[in-house]
Amino acid sequence: MKKIILNSVLLLFSVVLFTACEKDDPSPTDPNSSDLAIYEVMDLYTGINDNGKKPAPKKGDDPIAVIAQQGGFDELVSALVYVDSELGTGLVGLFSSDDDQYTVFAPTDDAFEALYAALSTDEAVVDEITDLPAELVLDVLLYHVTDGRRAANSVVPPRNYKYITTLLGEEFQVNTDAEIMAIGSTAQIIAADVSASNGIIHVIDAVLLPIN
């Protein structure tokens, strides 16, 4: 029953997001076939200005939730909808609104699949996000978000480490090679500065874990 309800919520979420995009674009991109190519994705090591720093991107047209759905972050969207349906967190609405600005470190679908494989045992196989406790998933999601628009030039340090305080209240570190050192895992920023109307997305290749 839980999966039937979740699938219904996911379908409704997709319809709402697609409708929002249709209002802004008379020829919307099919969300089932689109990817981050429809957005400006800045490479971490290009676009340097005369001062030796990459300029922060201007605000984009779409909110974070729409970019995640259109950009192929299916597992991340499923995680947001899961905690909303189970815990009433309102995260989908939060990342669909332009009221505030956030920076999201967004794991790819492959990153989530790797996590499921790592968590699976002979006694309990993890195939999808709903196989995990909703409270744990919420903590993981909040560990991937920080307040404000933080472009690559304020996330990746020129030397030493940069400390990022997340919405969970826990920190992780970023080194000069754009590697994230979290409490229970590491990840690499593989695409930076996907600009949204309500923040910035940095794509990462692993799910950050707030526990050892």
Image: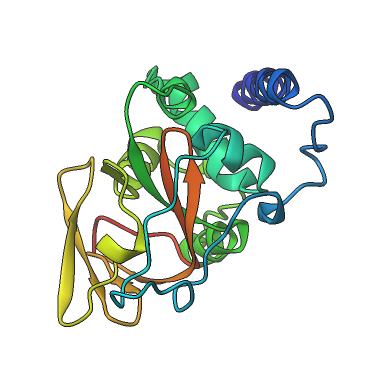
For residue 197, side relative to residue 209 (left or right): right
**In the image, 128: left or right of 161?**
right
Evaluate whether residue 97 shows in this view: yes
* Image location (x, y in percent) of residue 152: 35, 63
Residue 174, how many percent across, how many down?
A: 26, 70
**Quadrant location of the N terminus in the rendered image:** top right
Q: Is residue 106 left or right of residue 70?
A: left
The image position of residue 168, as x and y in percent, is 21, 42
Using the rendered view, name the quadrant where residue 77 is placed: top right
In the displayed structure, 23 sits above or below 186; it is above
Quadrant for the C terminus, please. bottom left
- Classify 30 as above or below 183: above
On the question of residue 130 being in view, the answer is: no
- Residue 86 placed where, x, y %? 44, 22
Residue beneath the point at 61% across and 56% down: 109
Res. 147 image quadrant: top left
Q: Residue at x 47, y 71 (%)?
A: 47
* Residue drawn at (32%, 45%) of the image: 149
